[in-house]
Structure formats: structure tokens, C-alpha cells
Image (cartoon, helix red, strand yellow):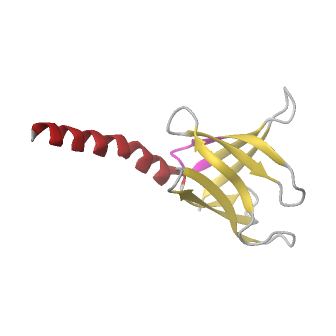
């Protein structure tokens, strides 16, 4: 009987980090220029995240377009990696994603050249 409790507690505790990570990045985010609102959702089958356009004031954008995909935890609880998609072209690039300022800012760093990465900032909505 004690062994059953130990296994139950082990499985309960091993699932907690996944729950807390999904709660930190899930939700709605607005772009730095406030022209877009993104929604980040988790795919519970593979525990990866996807960011889609929820609302946009840009004419070329469509609701539901994927902006970030295959987002997964990359090191510690505030660092993620994923793929950023262009809405105009079919370009995709690797991106490093970090939560900062009390998990209110999402910093997306895209390596373009060795010394000149581009950073994009989203703010919790």
C-alpha cells in the first residue's frame, strides 16, 4: 500500500512542471506596436505551444494565421525555443523565446546574422 502512495505522489509531482509552464506562456499577447493580438495555446498531445493571430489591424493578416509553432521548453522555465513564421512570405526561422519582467514580456530573438539578431517583444494582454 505504501508503494502505491509513493508512485502516486511521484506521478503527481512529475506532472506539475508541465502544468506550470503551460500556465506561464499560454494566453493572449499584444505586439509592441499594438497592431496584433496573438493567442498562445498548448497542444496537450505533445506539450508544445503554437501562437496564432487572434486579432489584427493589418490588412494582410488573417485571424488564425500561425506566427510561432513547435514551441517547447528550452532549458529553464522561462526559456523556450520554436519556429517563427512570416505572414507575408513562406519563410520560417528558428527563434529563442524568453519570458521576462515578471512573465509579462515575451522576448523573441531571431538570429539573422552572426552578430545582428533581431528581437521582437510581445506584452501580456
Q: Residue at x 84, y 26 (%)?
A: 115
Q: Residue at x 50, y 38 (%)?
A: 77
Q: Point out residue 16 in the picture as x, y percentages from the top left corner.
A: 36, 45
Q: Point out residue 97 in the picture as x, y percentages from the top left corner.
A: 65, 42
Q: Residue at x 73, y 65 (%)?
A: 36
- The single residue placed furthest to the right in the displayed view is 89
Q: Point out residue 27 in the picture as x, y percentages from the top left corner.
A: 55, 61
Q: Is residue 5 above or below residue 44?
A: above
**Is residue 102 highlighted in magenta?**
yes
The stretch in magenta equals 97-105
- The single residue placed furthest to the left in the displayed view is 1
Q: Is residue 36 above or below residue 107?
A: below
Q: Is residue 39 above or below residue 74?
A: below
Q: Looking at the image, which is closer to me, 76 or 13?
A: 13
Q: Residue at x 55, y 32 (%)?
A: 75
**Is residue 3 highlighted in magenta?**
no
Amino acid at each position: 500500500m505504501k508503494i502505491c502512495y509513493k508512485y502516486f505522489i511521484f506521478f503527481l509531482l512529475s506532472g506539475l512542471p508541465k502544468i506550470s509552464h503551460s500556465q506561464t506562456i499560454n494566453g493572449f499577447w499584444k505586439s509592441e506596436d499594438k497592431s496584433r493580438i496573438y493567442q498562445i495555446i498548448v497542444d496537450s498531445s505533445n506539450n508544445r505551444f503554437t501562437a496564432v493571430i487572434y486579432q489584427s489591424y493589418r490588412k494582410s493578416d488573417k485571424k488564425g494565421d500561425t506566427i510561432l509553432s513547435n514551441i517547447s521548453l528550452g532549458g529553464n522555465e522561462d526559456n523556450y525555443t520554436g519556429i517563427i513564421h512570416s505572414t507575408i512570405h513562406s519563410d520560417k526561422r528558428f527563434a529563442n523565446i524568453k519570458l521576462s519582467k515578471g512573465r509579462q514580456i515575451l522576448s523573441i530573438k531571431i538570429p539573422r546574422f552572426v552578430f545582428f539578431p533581431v528581437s521582437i517583444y510581445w506584452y501580456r494582454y
